[in-house]
Image (cartoon, rainbow, N blue to C red):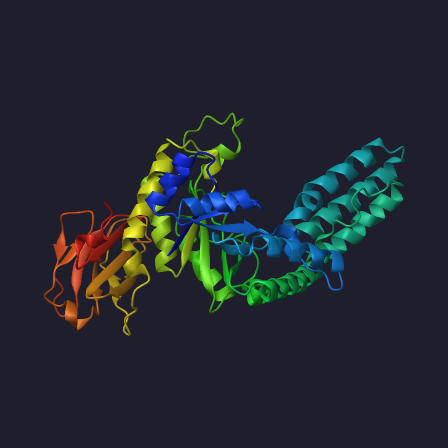
Amino acid sequence: MIIGLYELPEDDAKLKEIAESGFNLVRVPQDLKALDRVQEHDLRAWICLGSAANLAEGDENQKRRLTELVNRFKDRPALLVWELPDEAVWNIWWSRFNWSFSGQPDDLRKHIEKAKATESDANKWFSLLQKAQDYSQRGLWRQAEDVYDTLWTGLQVENPHPAWKMSTCQPEADELTKAVSRGCGLIKDLDPRHIIWQNHAPRNSIARLRQYNRMVDAAGCDIYPVPFSHSAGHSDLKDTNLTSVGAYTDRMRQAAPGKAIWMVLQGFGWRDLNKDSHDQDPEKGRRPNYHETRFMAYDAIVRGANAILYWGTHYIEKDSTLWQDLMRITRELRALEPALVGQVPQLQSTSTADETYGSIDGQGPQLMLRKTNEDWVLIAVNEHSQGISFAINGLPGELNGKVLYRLYSGETHTPRDGTIRDGIGGFGVHIYATSRRFEAQ
């Protein structure tokens, strides 16, 4: 299983630490020495091609640039992955948001206030500005832009950003998709051995992402939901809780059918991105704790992620609790690797939660059951914030009468008639196995 880190530590001792903890992939700059350094630690690397992968039709200069990049690095043993432009589709829309919703109306309001106009003309302009903002809030981009253009003309002021229009985002996304497809085609011609991966934002429609993902080998998105808040902006699903990680993993599977799913998880606290924040609330912007970090990793995995990668560790101290938690969880996942990539049984087991005070409706933990050689591993992930008692049914007959160790605890369970019963805490993860060899040392 791929477990990756966006950061390439400058300290060789830390690079050794992540390798020994179970990480096997790191992001490196477009630099041959960086690739060779990673190779020395028995790690593999990925390189982000960025805008170089956008190949406009007939653009020979860009084709030459992409060809030179691929040929420069493709034969280095450490290279495993080419990364396409980060959050490419979403960035088309995001690049216009601030101007469309605040920058442009604020600028126009100031120009109206400065204009030497009659009260009647000023009222007319303010009325038009309000109308344009109303159109924007309703998603009627073209109507809003027509009114804004009328205001710039009427005020005899040049629009500083005439091309920043929300109404052009969809055709630009169409063109980007074609350009990246051409780029992927060239990459595959030059270097068919390495993986092409796209990280998306936790945004955009499944149909749009599916169209974009046609030429990639792996796709996924970044999702950073800690701390949970009803007003948090990273997930725009109804689910903004920890379980948005699993929900977005499901979306990525729908958006990239038949492809590998790589999920980018939270290796920072939001306050780390803004060291100058004067907010004294210790909860707001905090880092994920161990329980949350472990849950997010397993929620992605049981929902179908083939790889997890951590972003943001370059913002945290390398002796911090979060760093230590990441190393601990990575060691745990690496010990489980034979099972995570093991045989999938033909019949899947099911779980049912007992009735409780919450809005559970019988939904038990999400399950993953795998066989590796003669051993079995069962992972149960509780996506409820409250603890539940539950039954797992439909376990393979060969498990009846065998001891299942609940790893990292002293508990054991013995299936009878394909069933075990247990209880699990809110956002808890239980791992049951026929051997303790799957426990990290």
Q: Horizontally, is 370 left or right of 173 in the view?
A: left
How far across and down, in percent of the image, does residue 427 sit? 31, 49
Answer whether residue 310 is visible to the viewer in this image: no
Q: Nearer the viewer, residue 135 or 141?
A: 141
Residue at 53% across, 43% down? 33
How far across and down, in percent of the image, does residue 34 sit? 52, 43
Q: Quadrant of the N terminus?
A: bottom left
Relative to 171, say whether 284 is above or below.
above
Number of callouts: 0
Q: Horizontally, is 204 left or right of 250 in the view?
A: right
Answer whether residue 388 is visible to the viewer in this image: yes
Residue at 77% across, 52% down? 145
How far across and down, in percent of the image, does residue 64 sit? 70, 57
Pick out the residue farthest to the left.
Answer: 401
Q: Nearer the viewer, residue 173 or 86?
A: 86
Relative to 368, say whether 4 is above or below.
above
Residue at 22% across, 50% down? 439
Relative to 274, say whether 393 is above or below.
below
Q: Quadrant of the C terminus?
A: top left
Q: Horizontally, is 380 left or right of 186 in the view?
A: left
Q: Horizontally, is 168 left or right of 118 in the view?
A: left
Q: Nearer the viewer, residue 295 or 362?
A: 295
Q: Looking at the rendering, which quadrant does residue 422 occupy?
A: bottom left
How far across and down, in percent of the image, does residue 300 sit? 39, 55
